[in-house]
Image (cartoon, helix red, strand yellow):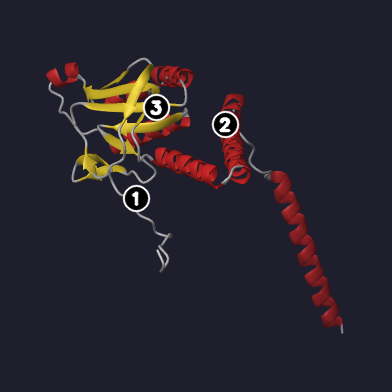
Amino acid sequence: MERNVVIRITIISFVVGFMIAVQYNTVKKPESRDTRDIWEIRHELAEEKRLHSELLNEIASLKKIKAEYEDEDSEEQGKALQSTVDDLRKRAGLTKVTGPGVHLNIQPAEELILSGYKVEPIPPDLLIRLVNEIYRYNGLYIEIDGQRVVHTTAIRDINGRTTVNSVPISNSNVDILIITESFEQAEKLYSYLYASTFRDDFYIDNLKLTIYPAREDITIGAYDGEFTNMYLQKGEGD
């Protein structure tokens, strides 16, 4: 009987001690604080608001399409459906596009080459970061050295050559064409890229990045590859 009492007291003492230790550790080591400054938080908030705005615009567009299908007769529904298909082909990169945008050019830095520096391929990781920033600042369509950038595009190193869509790009003269929603957006993109560190980043790799002012008439070609579907399959009757 006394042994059971001792065991119970021991267990209770252990539990109480454990709870005290946990409480002390919580007070002693509070959760790590958010150390970001106000500008970093504002930047992330602005990015979230931009994404939210894009989603709202997309929802409004889909609602408009749905209303058109419901209100029109069969002939008009066919036209609305064709318009939707054309818009989706445009978004996917399957058609040539002309609109306001920005033109970039990448060449070896002449003064460095004359000093004996070797011409190296454009680093894929730097090119990927540039593309991501372009999309982040409202770039809609991008073409790199004649290759249309689509959702399946891979930018990588293959056998020492930088490739876009598995096609090697030039080491000495690469044009990057960007189309935006409006000329105002093109000017904003130009201002951002011009004020960014990208020119210095490319110069470190002996490359000169030239950023030309926004234009009204940038033309980008259609993607000439094939899209592959991993999940969609034709039915037996198709």
Secondary structure of the residue carrying numbered label 2: helix
Q: 128 above or below 233? A: above
Residue 36 in view here: no
Which circle's residue, 3 or 2, is located before the other in the chain? 2
Q: Using the rendered view, name the quadrant where residue 170 is placed.
A: top left
- Going by the numbered disc 3, the residue's amino acid type is Ile
Residue 70 is left or right of residue 87, and the answer is right
**In this picture, residue 238 sits left or right of residue 117:** right
Q: Which mark is residue 11?
A: none
At label 1, counting other C-alpha atoms closer than 10 Å, the crowd grade (few under 14, some 14-19, many 20 or more) is few
**Residue that label 3 marks:** 179
SS for tag 1? Answer: loop
The numbered mark, 1 or 3, whose residue comes first in the sequence reads: 3
Tell me where residue 223 appears, x and y as whole percent. Answer: 31, 40
* Kind of residue indicated by mark 1: Phe
Q: Residue at x 22, y 42 (%)?
A: 167
- Residue ID at (56%, 31%): 47
Q: Residue at (64%, 37%) from the top-left corner? A: 33
Q: Residues within 10 Å of mark 2 (few under 14, many from 20)?
A: some
Circle 3 sits in a helix, a strand or a loop, which is it? strand
Counting labels gives 3
> What is the CA distance from the residue labelled 1 to the residue labelled 3?
22 Å
Question: Could you tell me residue 233's position as x and y percent?
Answer: 41, 62
Q: Position of residue 44 (x, y in %)?
A: 57, 32
On the rendered image, what quadrant is the N terminus found in? bottom right
Q: Quadrant of residue 161?
A: top left
Q: Residues within 10 Å of mark 3 (few under 14, many from 20)?
A: many
Alpha-carbon distance for marks 2 and 1?
29 Å
- Whether residue 166 appears in this view of the structure is yes
From the image, tell me which residue sits under label 1. 227
Which residue is label 2 attached to? 50
Q: Quadrant of the C terminus?
A: bottom left
